[in-house]
Amino acid sequence: MQAFKKIVVGLVMCLSMEQVMAVESTTYTEDKPVVRVEAKSPQFSIRLKSNPTTGYSWYLRSYDSNVMQPVKQVYEPPVNKKLIGAPGYEVWTFRVKPAGFVVPMQTVIRFVYARAWEVNGQAKQVVFQVTTSRE
């Protein structure tokens, strides 16, 4: 009976780890702007260097809401807390909807780095190319 319990506990742990791995997201940066999303792992993150102490923030300019949805946006402060004014990162998480995997698709996500009161000015823009796949 003890051996059976160990086997069952082992199987449950394996299945739990598989579910955690499926939810795990892949992170992309400005240096890695080509995003590939597979149906088995529909969530991904985009990590952008940011320094809100200067008044600048990343704004989501455009994305295809039929294919994906933003899940959350968080600011990661710099690791070294002693460096006042040092940049951290904004991490944007997206999830591709099931409709995004019906057929392979390509779309883009556009961000602008600007001050809230200067969004229409000469803002830095970053574009990510997103490709979906059923595999």
Image (spheres, rainbow, N blue to C red):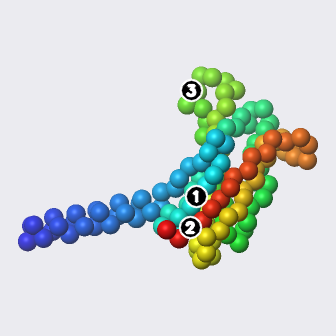
Residue 22 image position (x, y, % from top left): 45, 63
- Disc with the residue nearer the chain's start (2 vs 1): 1
Task: Give the distance between the C-alpha atoms of the residues marked 2 and 1, in whole angstroms.
Answer: 8 Å
Which circle, 3 or 2, is nearer the viewer? Answer: 2
Q: Are marks 3 and 2 in contact (CB under 8 Å)?
A: no
- Disc with the residue nearer the chain's start (1 vs 3): 1
Q: Are marks 1 and 3 in contact (CB under 8 Å)?
A: no
Where disc 1 sits, the SS reads: strand
Q: Residue at 25% across / 67% down in the picture? A: 11
**Residue on which disc 1 sits:** 36
Q: Residue at 80% across / 36% down in the picture? A: 55
Does residue 68 lie above or below 58 as drawn? below
Q: Residues within 10 Å of mark 2 (few under 14, many from 20)?
A: some
Residue 124 image position (x, y, % from top left): 81, 41
**Residue on which disc 2 sits:** 133
Q: Residues within 10 Å of mark 3 (few under 14, many from 20)?
A: few
